[in-house]
Amino acid sequence: MPVGERQLRELYLPPFKAGIVEAGALCVMPAYSEFDGIPCSSSEILLNRILREEWDFKGYTISDYCAIDMLVYMHRTAESNEQAAKQSIEAGMDMEAPDIKAFGEGLKRLVQNGQLPEELIDRAVSRILRVKISLGLFENPYADAKKIKSTVNCEAHRKLALEAAHESIVLLKNRDNLLPLDKNIESIAVIGPNADVAQLGDYCSEKKEAVSLLQGILNRAAPKTRISYAKGCGIYELSKDGFDEAVKAAAGSKAAIIAVGGSSMIDYGMGWGQDRGKIKTCGEGFDVTDLGLPGVQQELAEAVVNTGTPTIVVLIDGRPSGIPWIAENASAIIEAWYAGEEGGNALADIIFGNVNPSGRLTVSFPKSVGQTPVYYNYKPSARGFYKKPGSPENPGRDYVFMDTKPLFEFGFGLSYTEFEYSDLKIWPEKIRCDG
C-alpha cells in the first residue's frame, strides 16, 4: 500500500466515515484536489474501494463544479472531456455538475464505440434513482410554495440562529474582568470595518434582517448609554483617513469595541450568483499568505488601544488570525467567526453578560503563519527537537526568534465563571509506549 493511501486511511478517513456513512448521507462530493497523485474525481481507491466496498455507501457521488473537465485543463490526466468522463465514471463518479461537459453525449459515444461498458451507465443511474425514490421525489416532486413565507426566517429559526451564535462565539481574553460591561455604562465607541456590517460567511446571500455588531449593541445597551460609531478603515484598503474619527470616538468613551477581520463570499449558492463587486478575503479559493489582519486594520487597532480606553477587539472572520500584539495589549478579545444573521445580538448578549460565553476553539491560533501547522494532536517531533525557544532579544533553536506554541490553542475559551479543580489523580502515573 502506498504511504499516501495509508495516511489517508489512518488520519483522514475515520471522521469522514462517521460523517458520511453513519449519518446516512445520500450524496458525496469528492474534493477538487488530488491525493497520492490521483485526482479525487477519478480515484477508484476513494470512490469505489473505500466508499463503496469498505464503507458500504449506498448513495450517489456528484462532482464538484467542473471537477470532471478539470481532469483535462488543470490536473492534465485526460486529453479530452470524453477521456475525463471515462476516467471518472470508471472510478465511481455518478453525476456531473453543474453542466454536462464530459458526461451526456460523451458517455453515449464511449458506449457506442465499445470503450465503456453500458453497465457502468446503469450503475450510476440506478444509484441516483435509488436516492430519488427513497426521498419520495417521484410521488411528491415539488415543495409547497405556500410554506415559504411562514417558514423562511420564522421566529423559531431566528431563535435557533441566536442560540447557535451564542454557543459559537469564543472569549479569548478578559483582562481584569473587563467583560461583561455594565449595561448602564455611560458611553461606548463601536469602531471598525466589521462593526456595521453583518458578515454571514461563505456561500451566503445578504439578508436585510441580519444584525450587525453595532445594531446589536444598540439593541442591548441601556437607552441612556451614548453609542459612537466610526468605521476607521476598510477591510483591505490602505487609507487611514478614518483613523482620527475612530481615535476621537474611543478617547471620548468609557469603553471601545473594535470589530476587525475579513469578509467572505456574497450571493453565491447552488449555481452562480451575482458578485456585485463585494471584496472577499476568505472563502473557497480565497487564500492568503499572511494571517495578520488585512489592510491597515492592525494599525487601527493599535491606535484605538493606545488611547488608553479599555478596548474589546472582536474578530469577525473565517480563519484564525495571527494577532500577537493585540493578544498582549488589548483588554479583551472575542472571536465571533461569521456568527450568522443574529450575530450582532449574540455578541451584545455576551458583551453585556446576558449570556455566559461558552465557545471553545476548534482550531489553534498561530502567532505567525510561519508556525503553521499548529494543530493539537501533533507528533513529538513536529514542534522541534531542541526545545530551546528563541526571541528577538535572545535567539534560540527550533524557531530562532519565536517559540513553537500557538497563540491560543485548540480547545481554548474563557467564560465569566471561575472553575477550580482539586484532588485530581492520574492512573497509571506512567503510560507505556503501547498503553
Image: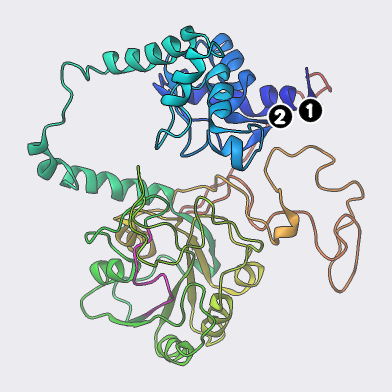
Q: How far is mark 1 from mark 2, CA to CA?
A: 6 Å
Amino acid type at circle 2 is: Ile
Q: Is mark 2 on a helix, strand or loop?
A: loop
The quarter of the picture where residue 366 lies is: bottom right
Secondary structure mostly seen in magenta is loop
Q: Which region of the structure is painted magenta?
A: 189-199
Image location (x, y in percent) of residue 46 = 60, 22
Q: In this view, does 353 lie above or below 145?
A: below
Identify the residue at image location x=86%, y=63%.
Answer: 390
Vertically, is 173 above or below 31?
below
418 inside magenta stretch: no
Q: Are marks 1 and 2 in contact (CB under 8 Å)?
A: yes
Q: Which residue does the image show at 54% across and 32% down from the upper left?
A: 81
- Quarter location, residue 259: bottom left
Residue 347 at what x, y percent from top left? 37, 61
Tell me where residue 287 sits by quadrant.
Answer: bottom right
Q: What colour scheme does the image use?
A: rainbow
Residue 197 is a magenta residue:
yes
Q: Which quadrant would the C terminus be assigned to in this image?
A: top right
Give the camera-side residue of 138 and 388: 138
Q: How many labels does the image show?
A: 2
Q: How crowded is mark 1: few (under 14 residues within 10 Å), some or many (20 or more)?
A: few
Residue that appears at 55% across and 24% down:
88
Left or right: residue 246 versus residue 394 is left
Q: Name the residue under label 2.
A: 426
Q: What residue type is labelled 1?
A: Glu
- Left or right: 375 with respect to 166? right
Question: Mark 1 = which residue?
Answer: 429
Q: Residue lying farthest left?
A: 146
143 or 404, nearer to the observer: 143
Residue 253 x, y percent position in the rendering: 39, 85
Q: What element carries label 1?
A: loop
